[in-house]
Image (cartoon, grey):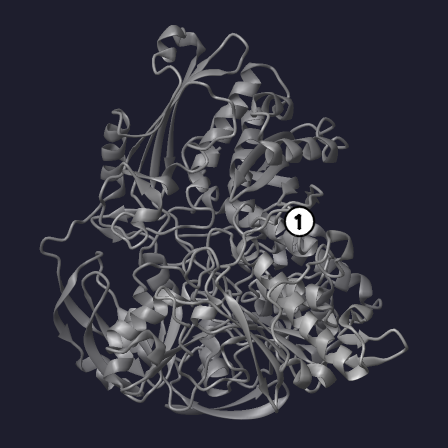
């Protein structure tokens, strides 16, 4: 099997602490080839350079180099390490690692949750860590029993010798720590896995069900203050004048002051607690200077985008015969225009960060998907080096991309306020209104597509224009994904389509708009999959072919992941998809993203003028399924997240530069009734390297639902959100 | 500022706060019961659901001055009740949670449902849980856990 290899220059180092047992650490050299510096901080219960800590009581604490915000990585990565280590799972604890070089993503080179890469990129890394730790424990036991290591076997945190000897990992930890770290270890074959591939329950369930688990927003430190910020009504506006007498009169308010923002300026209110801070903010009278600030308006943006869409832009794909369309009669062409609005992520836990600045060092607490970047931002604001900022990864209540922001605006606001309150920890809270109105949205997009249908019913010519802001231009990540004026994240899912479309021209326009934009779970696939899968469905209907059969016919033979999921979907839905009650219809879609193939079928009727999703069946090919239970959950629930773009209030709109929605009353994500009543998930058996499951559930559901609606009403739905059917 | 005597999870607690302070923030910041979550502040998401006088209540919009002597039960104490315990256990058994942030509110809403309707239909579930947002979208497993908890409860337990 293939798996992303960790940096071969990396090496293990082992240290021993009498109180806490064996510590296995993996250091990766930094760009200069020097050993990564030890992060300067006092440890919570572990040194932050270690991955595994075998405690004298037998507990095995594994550091998770990722944020846990629902995707289940706090369970899955410890499973991978514990499996190779033969650790007793009932004694394994997963902890979220703080920011440190050693915890950087082996492929991305920064500490991040992104690109559905947590398992994909760290599977091999955590296996090797587990196997090396096990080898050292065996070496210690072999010494003790005066035998060779190959005579030993391990199970459930114990080493066994050939003559009835046994010792626990905790007993061996001290000796093991003095053993050399093996340069190379054999990894298990899939048949030897004890945890990988098993339906293992999440380790964070109970504390999330009894209220004991602390999220970033729950942090409580001695002397801590709470801050909220009044942001300008238009992105980039600046404070002209503040009248704050009324605000300052509220009991518990400590300070009111102007602060710089990522764009423009704002007013910070610091109080003993949240409620006085919020009340005081609502009593501020601020004159805003909007001179020279563009005030975008959704209606005008659509006009502008449509004008752009009528012209070719930068070339993303130019394949085959660019004149193929001319040979196709008008009656055999489909011309389709699609509109996708701005979307907010709105994770359930409102965004927050706590910072304490002590002059020559600082401490920060954040549910961050982007620890390296956010730590650097805090340091920069405070005039410190990143290693002078101890950066704790807090459990996060959802994120969906919103906690990986290239300008770290939340952390910068928090650090700016903490700088003024030197010595005092300050928790910055963005209220839901701040979140809904604060930007960093999935960009709005316009697609204009012309498809020419060949005599076989397959697409013979495809001309496609995408209009939308670039996510990455102007950021430090521009060089990764922007080429020839095309931001790959705007066209992913179309430019790399697995359908056999011989003549494909794809153009892109990236207008500049004064609205901050950001990746939204599954990024460009949210709109590209919708366009592709609704058009393919329309072609299947025109060709009078079964939607699964048509897709199987049109996919390239090398699209193995999608082909396998469609074949599995075909079997898994055989019992119901052609026997639906009157008024119910089938909708199908498939899409590959982040190297995971997904096929989806839904049964939909119309109730109270809304789609009622009676069931969904999903087939997934994600390579080795590390934790099938988590994968099942991710897909069941991820469909619900994907429906954010179908619900009637699933849009952020602007008028005179101001966001028109304020909270969940105006921007309303799916409730229980909007989501599938039942979802069955089927995983294609595989021994290939695991690929991500965080984002791939999202793209498939919306096209599947509107494809079903099209069967019920005869209409095609191309403008989102779905305000009426 | 005013002083209020509250009965929270069976204990008398005194707080000195502005009368307009929502019960949510009294629980979270004054009583350090952070299991009850802030999600929206306008009773649109249900993350702040607690029981006030036995009724599932959005604590983010109830000023502390309106609580009176009605007993308050939060997620931290709901296991003390057989229905509460059954629901929490079912949530764990069904592996419902993902990010988990909304689940205190979901569980408090589900407990209130089962106390009034021990054998809920799909429609009962949709009505009672209909205003609790889960951005992860764990709704299918929430449905399953409620049914599983209902099946665990002896008849008339509520």
Total numbered labels placed on residues in the image: 1
Q: Of helix, strand and loop, which one carries label 1?
A: loop
Q: Position of residue A78 (x, y in %)?
A: 63, 67
**A440 or A580, nearer to the observer:** A440
A233 shown above or below A380: above
Q: Residue at x 24, y 39 (%)?
A: A511
Q: Is residue A225 visible?
A: yes
Q: Position of residue A276 (x, y in %)?
A: 33, 81
A725 shown above or below A21: above
**B153 or A719, nearer to the observer:** A719
- Residue at numbered disc 1: A624
* Left-right relation of A470 to A459: left
Q: Residue at x 33, y 63 (%)?
A: A434
Q: Residue at x 69, y 31 (%)?
A: A567
Q: Chain of mark 1?
A: A
Tag 1: Cα neighbours inside 10 Å, few (<14), some, or many (≥20)?
Answer: many
A507 shown above or below A635: above
A94 shown above or below A189: below
**A676 or A590, nearer to the observer:** A590
* Left-right relation of A468 to A629: left
Give the quadrant of residue A438.
bottom left
Give the quadrant of residue A188.
bottom right
Q: Position of residue A167 (x, y in %)?
A: 79, 81
């Amino acid at each position: 099997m293939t798996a992303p290899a960790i940096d071969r220059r990396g090496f293990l180092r082992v240290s021993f602490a009498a109180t806490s047992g064996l510590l296995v650490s993996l250091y990766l050299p930094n760009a200069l080839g020097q050993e990564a510096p030890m992060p300067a901080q006092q440890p919570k219960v572990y040194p932050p350079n270690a991955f595994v800590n075998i405690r004298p009581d037998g507990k095995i604490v594994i550091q998770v180099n990722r944020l846990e915000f629902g995707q289940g990585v706090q369970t899955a990565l410890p499973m991978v390490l514990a499996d190779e280590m033969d650790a007793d799972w009932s004694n394994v604890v997963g902890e979220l690692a703080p920011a440190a070089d050693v915890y950087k993503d082996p492929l991305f080179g920064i500490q991040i949750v992104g690109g559905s890469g947590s398992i994909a990129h760290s599977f091999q890394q955590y296996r090797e860590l587990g196997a090396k730790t096990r080898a050292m424990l065996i070496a210690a036991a072999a010494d003790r029993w005066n035998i060779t290591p190959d005579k030993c076997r391990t199970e459930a945190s114990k080493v066994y010798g050939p003559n009835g000897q046994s010792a626990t990992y905790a007993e061996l930890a001290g000796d093991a720590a003095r053993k050399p770290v093996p340069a190379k270890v054999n990894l298990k074959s899939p048949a030897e896995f004890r945890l990988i591939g098993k339906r293992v329950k999440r380790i964070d369930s109970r504390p999330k069900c009894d209220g004991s688990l602390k999220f970033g927003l729950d942090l409580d430190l001695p002397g801590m203050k709470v801050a909220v910020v009044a942001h300008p009504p238009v992105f980039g506006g600046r404070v002209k004048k503040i009248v704050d007498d009324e605000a300052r009169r509220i009991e518990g308010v400590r300070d009111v002051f102007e602060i710089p923002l990522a764009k423009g300026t704002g007013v910070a209110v610091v109080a003993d607690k949240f409620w006085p801070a919020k009340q005081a903010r609502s009593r501020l009278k601020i004159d805003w200077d909007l001179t020279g600030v563009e005030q975008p308006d959704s209606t005008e943006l659509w006009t502008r985008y449509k004008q752009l869409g009528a012209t070719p832009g930068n070339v993303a794909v130019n394949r085959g015969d660019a004149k193929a369309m001319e040979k196709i009669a008008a009656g055999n062409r489909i011309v389709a225009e699609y509109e996708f609005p701005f979307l907010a992520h709105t994770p359930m836990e409102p965004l927050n960060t706590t910072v304490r600045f002590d002059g020559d060092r600082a401490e920060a607490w954040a549910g961050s998907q982007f620890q390296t970047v956010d730590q650097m931002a805090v340091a920069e604001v405070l005039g410190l080096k990143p290693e002078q900022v101890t950066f704790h990864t807090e459990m996060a209540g959802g994120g969906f991309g919103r906690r990986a922001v290239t300008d770290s605006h939340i952390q910068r606001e928090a650090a700016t306020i903490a700088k003024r309150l030197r010595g005092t920890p300050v928790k910055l809270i963005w209220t839901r209104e701040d979140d809904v109105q604060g930007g960093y949205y999935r960009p709005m997009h316009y697609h204009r597509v012309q498809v020419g249908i060949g005599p076989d019913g397959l697409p013979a010519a495809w001309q496609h224009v995408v209009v939308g802001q670039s996510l990455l231009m102007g950021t430090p990540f521009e060089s990764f994904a922007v080429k020839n004026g095309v931001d790959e994240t705007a066209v992913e899912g179309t430019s790399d389509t697995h359908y056999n479309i011989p003549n494909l021209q794809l153009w892109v326009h990236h207008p500049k708009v004064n609205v901050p934009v950001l990746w939204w779970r599954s990024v460009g696939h949210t709109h590209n999959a919708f366009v592709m899968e609704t058009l393919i469905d329309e072609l299947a209907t025109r060709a009078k072919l079964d939607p699964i059969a048509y897709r199987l016919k049109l996919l390239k033979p090398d699209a193995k992941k999608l082909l396998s999921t469609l074949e599995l979907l075909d079997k898994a839905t055989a019992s119901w998809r052609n026997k639906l009650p009157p008024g119910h219809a089938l909708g199908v879609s498939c899409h590959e993203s982040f190297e995971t193939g997904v096929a989806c079928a839904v049964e939909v009727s119309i109730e109270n003028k809304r789609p009622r999703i009676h069931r969904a069946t999903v087939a997934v090919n994600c390579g080795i399924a590390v934790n099938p239970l988590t994968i099942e959950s991710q897909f069941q629930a991820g469909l619900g997240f994907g429906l954010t773009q179908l619900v009637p209030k699933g849009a952020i709109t602007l008028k005179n530069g101001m966001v028109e929605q304020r909270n969940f009353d105006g921007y309303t994500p799916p409730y229980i009734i909007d989501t599938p009543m039942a979802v069955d998930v089927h995983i294609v058996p595989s021994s290939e390297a695991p690929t991500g499951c965080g984002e791939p559930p999202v793209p498939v559901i919306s096209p599947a639902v509107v494809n079903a609606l099209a069967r019920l009403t005869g209409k095609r739905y191309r403008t989102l959100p779905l305000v009426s059917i | 500022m005013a002083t209020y005597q509250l009965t929270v999870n069976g204990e008398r607690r005194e707080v000195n706060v502005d009368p307009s302070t929502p019960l949510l923030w009294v629980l979270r910041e004054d009583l350090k019961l952070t299991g009850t979550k802030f999600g929206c502040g306008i009773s649109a998401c249900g993350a702040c659901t607690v029981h006030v006088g036995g009724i599932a209540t959005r604590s983010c919009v109830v000023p502390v001055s309106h609580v009176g002597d009605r007993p308050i039960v939060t997620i931290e104490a709901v296991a003390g009740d057989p229905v509460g315990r059954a629901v929490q256990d079912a949530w764990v058994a069904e592996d419902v949670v993902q990010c988990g942030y909304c689940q205190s509110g979901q569980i408090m809403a589900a407990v209130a449902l089962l106390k009034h309707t021990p054998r809920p239909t799909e429609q009962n579930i949709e009505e009672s849980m209909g205003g609790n947002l889960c951005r992860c979208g764990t709704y299918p497993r929430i449905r399953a856990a409620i049914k599983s908890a209902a099946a665990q409860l002896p008849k008339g337990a509520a």
